[in-house]
């Protein structure tokens, strides 16, 4: 295994993903009869990069490509189709690490910690609540074009990872997607084999926490140690700034405001004052980055879901709708209802009122 790793390997910079993701998109679009080269050029990507070596692709450009293709091909579940094609074996170093972890929980925690060696366009978070585990995915920039499609693509990829680790018949208890339900939801049920909830506040798989204790057949501890060492070398060669690490943390935790400066400081093994001082040196603060994350997630939920303003306010842990409206007006210069109308008028989408949603 180790001999396949090369010194030229490097982690993506923030906002970039490995080109393998675009290759999966190409396969699906060609099968659907799309003019892939034209779509790639229109999305602002260099077609030659797709067949190059270990090059990186801007996450925003991949989002534009998926959104553009979904619109042109009249395929609102395109993200799902792309994610279905990604296997654990195709996931470079990360795939080797995951399949050689002792348990499913070890593998998912490794995915949470080391996704950045392959993808710095999004953040994975694993939470355990009594007997239930929640594995979430959040785009680093939730308001990019195609964010909802990106998210469902990522969730399909993670589902394939879990089926590789647990058996092909594995299925979650339920699937959460932060997007409006398309007219035809059958492809989602057919792939996930579980109830799919649209208009949710996060992208997540929900499953029994006991699964985390399941051992992984064929795992080789020696290979795992080798791969972990290579990953540490890659991460050390291009370390993320503290501000970027905190942004990633906040993207994964801002829903229900599970983000706390003290907790992040403990994760970084520093005290709160040291964290504040280092953030000031980088020209920002914990409060500023938290507001930035809340604003980004609020815009994504307003644009891509039919959640009411009250539901979005509660998801972001505001005490009441008026507090959310005041904060959003401070961030954007307009009320969230006005922002939603203007955003949806740009895409000719229906505008939902602040009425409770069924189900």
Image (cartoon, rainbow, N blue to C red):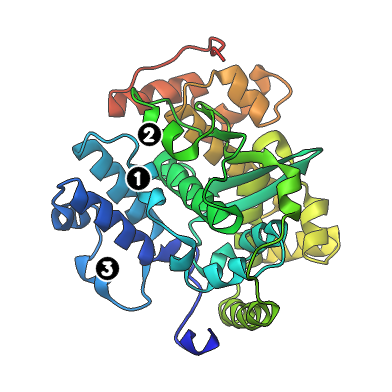
Residue displayed at 43% across by 63% down: 17
Look at the picture and state if 249 lies above or below 358.
below
How crowded pointer 1 is (Cα within 10 Å; few <14, some 14-19, many 20+) is rated as many
Residue displayed at 59% across by 39% down: 172
Q: Decide if residue 4 is in sight here.
A: yes
Residues at marks 1 and 2, CA–CA distance in whole angstroms: 9 Å
**Which residue position holds label 1?**
81
Q: Nearer the viewer, residue 187 or 260?
A: 187
Q: Decide if residue 325 is in sight here.
A: no
Of marks 1 and 2, which one's residue comes earlier in the chain? 1
How crowded pointer 2 is (Cα within 10 Å; few <14, some 14-19, many 20+) is rated as few
| Disc 1 + disc 2, Cβ < 8 Å | yes
| Disc 2 + disc 3, Cβ < 8 Å | no
Of marks 3 and 1, which one's residue comes earlier in the chain? 3
Label for residue 187? Answer: 2
Regarding mark 1 in the picture, which secondary structure is present there? helix
Q: Nearer the viewer, residue 175 or 342?
A: 175
From the image, which quarter does the C terminus lie in? top right
Q: Quadrant of residue 114?
A: bottom right
Regarding mark 2 in the picture, which secondary structure is present there? helix
Q: Nearer the viewer, residue 282 or 354?
A: 354
Label for residue 50? Answer: 3
Label for residue 31? Answer: none
How crowded pointer 3 is (Cα within 10 Å; few <14, some 14-19, many 20+) is rated as many
């Amino acid at each position: 295994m180790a001999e396949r790793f090369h010194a030229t390997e490097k982690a993506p910079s923030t906002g970039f993903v490995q080109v393998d993701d675009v290759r999966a998109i190409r396969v699906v679009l060609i099968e659907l009869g799309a003019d892939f080269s034209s779509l790639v050029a229109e999305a602002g990507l260099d077609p030659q990069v797709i067949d190059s070596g270990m090059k990186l692709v801007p996450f925003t450009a991949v989002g534009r490509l998926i959104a553009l293709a979904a619109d042109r091909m009249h395929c609102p579940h395109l993200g799902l189709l792309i994610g279905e094609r990604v296997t654990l074996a195709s996931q470079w170093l990360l795939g080797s690490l995951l399949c050689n972890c002792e348990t499913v929980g070890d593998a998912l925690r490794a995915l949470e910690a080391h996704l950045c060696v392959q993808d710095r366009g999004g953040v994975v978070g694993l939470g355990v609540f009594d007997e239930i585990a929640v594995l979430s995915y959040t785009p680093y920039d939730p308001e990019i074009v195609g964010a909802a499609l990106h998210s469902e693509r990522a969730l399909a990829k993670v589902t394939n990872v879990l089926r590789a680790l647990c058996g092909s018949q594995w299925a979650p208890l339920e699937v959460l997607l932060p997007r409006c339900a398309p007219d035809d939801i059958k492809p989602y049920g057919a792939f996930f084999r579980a109830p799919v909830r649209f208009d949710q506040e996060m992208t997540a798989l929900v499953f029994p926490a006991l699964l985390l204790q399941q051992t992984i057949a064929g795992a080789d501890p020696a290979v795992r140690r080798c791969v972990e060492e290579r990953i540490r070398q890659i991460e050390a060669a291009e370390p993320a700034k503290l501000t970027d690490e905190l942004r990633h943390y906040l993207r994964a935790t801002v829903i229900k405001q599970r983000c706390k400066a003290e907790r992040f400081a403990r994760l970084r093994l520093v005290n709160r004052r040291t964290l504040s001082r280092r953030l000031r040196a980088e020209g920002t603060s914990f409060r500023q980055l938290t507001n930035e994350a809340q604003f980004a997630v609020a815009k994504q939920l307003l644009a891509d879901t039919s959640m009411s303003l009250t539901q979005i306010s509660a998801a972001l842990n505001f005490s009441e709708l008026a507090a959310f409206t005041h904060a959003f007006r401070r961030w954007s210069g307009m009320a969230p209802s006005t922002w939603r109308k203007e955003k949806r008028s740009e895409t000719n989408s229906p505008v939902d009122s602040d009425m409770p949603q069924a189900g």
